[in-house]
Amino acid sequence: WGNTLLAHGQLKVSIADELDMMEPQPDDDPSWDPWTESQELYVEADELLVQAGRLFRRLLELSPQEERALVNWGGALCL
């Protein structure tokens, strides 16, 4: 479950990064703002990554030998 949250959070960060680089096009809907959309995605990604980090930390508390959980926890913290 933690890996799914981590992957989903990473995907949202990537999409938000792409939206940040977008320039408005003349045929775009004037009510659509890529910057606002990207900020919402960053907030959602942050929530997912925090949840993933908590799951990985909990797994390490239960089983300190879980090296993969430590790597994944680090990955969640870095994003």
Image (cartoon, rainbow, N blue to C red):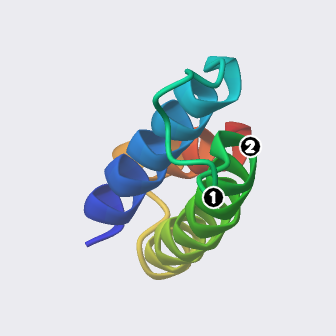
Is residue 40 in sight in this rendering? yes
Return the residue nearer the eye: 22 or 15.
Answer: 22
- Give the percent coordinates (x, y) of residue 22: 61, 20
Q: Residue at x 51, y 68 (%)?
A: 60
Give the class, few, some or many, for how many residues have Cα within 10 Å of label 1's Cα (few <14, many ≥20). few
SS assignment at label 2: helix
Residue 36 location, x and y as percent? 73, 55
Q: Which residue is mark 2?
A: 35
Where disc 1 sits, the SS reads: loop
Which mark lies nearer to you, 2 or 1?
1
Q: Nearer the viewer, residue 55 or 60?
A: 55
Quadrant of the image occupied by residue 49: bottom right
Q: Amino acid at mark 1?
A: Ser
- Left or right: residue 31 compared with residue 72: right
> Residue type at mark 2?
Trp
Report, in whole angstroms, how far the alpha carbon at label 2 lies from the one at label 1: 12 Å
The C terminus, quarter of image = top right
x and y percentages locating residue 12 in the rendered image: 47, 48
Q: Is residue 28 above or below residue 70?
A: above
**Residue toward you, 5 or 63:** 5
Q: Residues within 10 Å of mark 2 (few under 14, many from 20)?
A: some
Residue 31: assigned label: 1
In the rendered view, tell whether residue 28 sits above or below residue 6: above
Residue at image coords 59%, 53%: 32
- Where residue 56 appears, as percent x and y from the top left, is 48, 66
